Image (tube, rainbow, N blue to C red):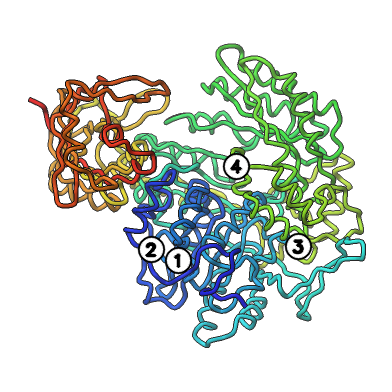
Amino acid sequence: MVSKKNLDKSCGVQGGSKIIDDKTLDAILPLVNKPSRYCGNEINAIRKDWDDVGLRMVLAFPDLYEIGMSHQGLQILYHLVNGRDDLLAERVYAPDPDMEAELQRAQTPLFSLESRRPIADFDLLGITLPFELCYTNILTILNSAGIPFRAADRDESYPLVIGGGPCGFHPEPVADFFDAILLGDGEEAIMEIAELLAAAKEEGVARDEQLARLSEVAGVYVPSLFVPIYADDGKFTGMKTLRPGYERVRRRVLADLESVPAPYPPLVPLSRIVHDRLGIEIARGCTRGCRFCQAGVIYRPVRERSPARILELARQGIDQGGFEEMALLSLSTGDYSCLPELMLELMDTFARERVSVSMPSMRVGTLTPEIMAQIKRVRKTGFTLAPEAGTDRLREVINKGITEVDLLKTCEAAFSLGWRQIKLYFMFGLPTETDEDMAAIPDLAQKALAAAGGGNKTVSVSAATFVPKPHTVFEREPQLSIAEGYARIDFLKSRLRGKKFNLKRHDPRQSYLEGVFSRGDRVLAQVIEVAWRKGARLDAWSDHFNLELWQQAATECGVDFDHYLRRRGADEVLPWQHLDSGLDKEFFTAEYEKALAGEYTPDCRVHGCQKCGLCDFKTVKPIVHTVSAEESPAAISAGWSRPEPGAEDHFVYRIDYSRVDEARYLGHLELIQVFYRVLRRARLPLNFSHGFNPGPKVTFSPALPVGTESLAEYLYVDLKEPLPDLAAMKDSLNSFLPIGLTVFGLELTGKVGNGKELESCYRIVPPRQIAASEVERFFSDDSFPVELVRKGKKRILDARPLVKELVVDGDDGSIRLVLKGVPGQPGIKPLELLAALLGLGDEEKRTIRLIKLWVKDAT
């Protein structure tokens, strides 16, 4: 048995119980890209005393921070667990390869963001399974934490590793890496799991017994209690359970979204992330019945939040997070039963605060001109429609339920309301697809552009290979080969020419690998491990993906990837058949026959039960709301404060602040975002810019390089009215600012700074001892030319007239530097000067500790 103190080479760095300290991080973070990913100083992050709880879990998302922080599910579980005084939940995300390498070099284990505890110190490691191309990232997390890959190699000294998420319904390629996997909604199940493991920990129960107990929790799949069976020719023939009565695992269903707390106060990232906005889940589940869609199966039935609750969450989330955009989240937001009334009231309430509303999952036919008019009141958010197929015939096969006429009417309405670009999403390789169906894709894009009626309008077409997913009507269909995928892309390229069209295609090689792991078995675990050792990382990112590594790994393991993409026989046992999505087999069979006949299956929420087999209509049933007079959005928000528009007065204040410690790792754009949100949370009466994308009228001091600290930063903010109590407002701002940012000055100036020549003083701790003679030689000549790179171009700048003072000052060999500069004219950064003077390399330059002490007018 492998122990934490005696890891083999496969497990990377050694785990341990020591908190990662500032000194260790200071030696690592300056050397990596986007160090703010690893600081954990988000607004509203929860930190608990390690010794005050009975069970400690860390929730991991197997992708980079900017993807994982955009994931709503992890935040839901994070807040639910931390809502209990006796439980603790922290977070970790997959490290970028540069961070992975630096952790390995420093022999430092991967750590949680909140407490910086090594991942191996927790009782439970919960890993989201969002997408098949994240699988190597799971191994990166385990390896960087010093945890053996295989569950069979982990003893009681390691945390239990539990997965959950969409890929939990077809997890066999990664099943050997997990102790348990949860199928379905996690809100209730995670609390049952936590209580069970806390009790087992108190009793000192062995790991095998813990797994046996977990198997009794509804929705929990314990892979070690199932053994795959293969014929002599290697063909998968079924699963054998090692525990009688545990032959199938049925997914969990949360009966009512309102039965559990929302994830509030929302986590607010300081780094820029993919979906940087307030997410409000207005409904879960979709019963439109698209036959290719796995989400429509594993998240049904439809369960809506009430309009009153959504409005409360919107007000609370904007107040607590300071976001400038909220997203109404659902698999099909346009199908929300009270959407017109809800949108009107949301926009009436938040448009004056310049908070926009986006709906990432709209559907043709539900996106009415009235709703579009509401969306554009603050700023026009993205406009994407998903016809999926080019012809009405093929859309009937997949049960899309929209026609070409519906689509073109929506495009015409969008263009008429001011949108300049429409995005259309298609798949190719769908069952029964013909050449005519493919030809109809560019034809439909042409017709959508014609609906614009001329002008500078564009159509963006996104196209991807259809991947047959488990637990769908088309789960047994074949998938296109890589060559076939590229041939279809080449066809679309030939038909979509000119500046009016933009074709974006998903790489068929990535779709190929996604298809392999979607319908794969446990044989693939070894392939994943070999590919990871060869360097496969972040396979969902095109700049990291390398199919050749995977093909080499498959060859070494004797695995034929194409075998997994073939058509599956009607009686063939599938690797996921022991996992129950809740829908009857007969329903899938009937839907497949209807697909071939082009017959439509209506939405059960409005056309009655379609006999899928999931609902018992006692506990599990659709929840759809109607609007009563008492519960209308207008009635709920009637008492809210709404500033009335009026004449735009201007009161300009200067805010002086310091930026130290973890805050020094924020980029300039990230810093701007932080202050925008803090100013909103402090309820400052902001003036906004006008035009397409209005923002607060704020002017910031010049950008500092990432890693530079400062005691002398400032910004100017333009307000509609004067502040009555400057001291109270300064305290308010500081209460909302994250660690490392502190306001120390606030004054009414009446105007933005005058741009006179400034002097800036810096204290610099170089990476090595510097002799005074090295610094003094700078002044020995009348000029000191330095080669700089600006906007990709090299130029020579004389640094001599820009330096007022440069001396070695302090017992630690620190340097005092005073630079002169004129805004708008060429200048030099302190690190550029020091690198040229001392001959420092890139790595030495990045480890310099630099702090700006003061800035003032040169006069």
Mark-to-mark CA distance, 4 and 2: 28 Å
**Dot 4: few (<14), some (14–19), or many (≥20) neighbours within 10 Å?**
few
Q: Tag 2 or tag 4, which sits nearer the N-term?
A: 2
Mark-to-mark CA distance, 2 and 3: 36 Å
Which of the 4 quarters of the picture holds residue 507? top right
> Would residue 520 appear left or right of 708 to someone viewing this image?
right
Q: What label sits on residue 544 in the rendered view?
A: 4
Q: What label sits on residue 118 in the rendered view?
A: 1
In the displayed structure, 118 sits above or below 442; it is below
Q: Secondary structure at mark 1?
A: loop
**Type of amino acid under label 1:** Pro
Closer to the camera, 640 or 457?
Answer: 457
Q: What label sits on residue 20 in the rendered view?
A: 2
Mark-to-mark CA distance, 1 and 2: 7 Å
- Confirm or deny contact between disc 1 and disc 2 (CB under 8 A): yes
Q: Residue at x 75, y 64 (%)?
A: 580
The x, y position of residue 472, in whole percent, is 77, 51
Q: Tag 3 or tag 2, which sits nearer the N-term?
A: 2
**Dot 2: few (<14), some (14–19), or many (≥20) neighbours within 10 Å?**
some
Extreme residue in the top direction: 454
Q: Residue at x 54, y 74 (%)?
A: 6
Which of the 4 quarters of the picture holds residue 598? top right
The x, y position of residue 174, in whole percent, is 68, 61
**Type of amino acid under label 3:** Arg
Is residue 619 in view? Answer: yes
Q: Nearer the viewer, mark 2 or mark 3?
A: 2
Q: Tag 3 or tag 4, which sits nearer the N-term?
A: 3
**Type of amino acid under label 4:** His
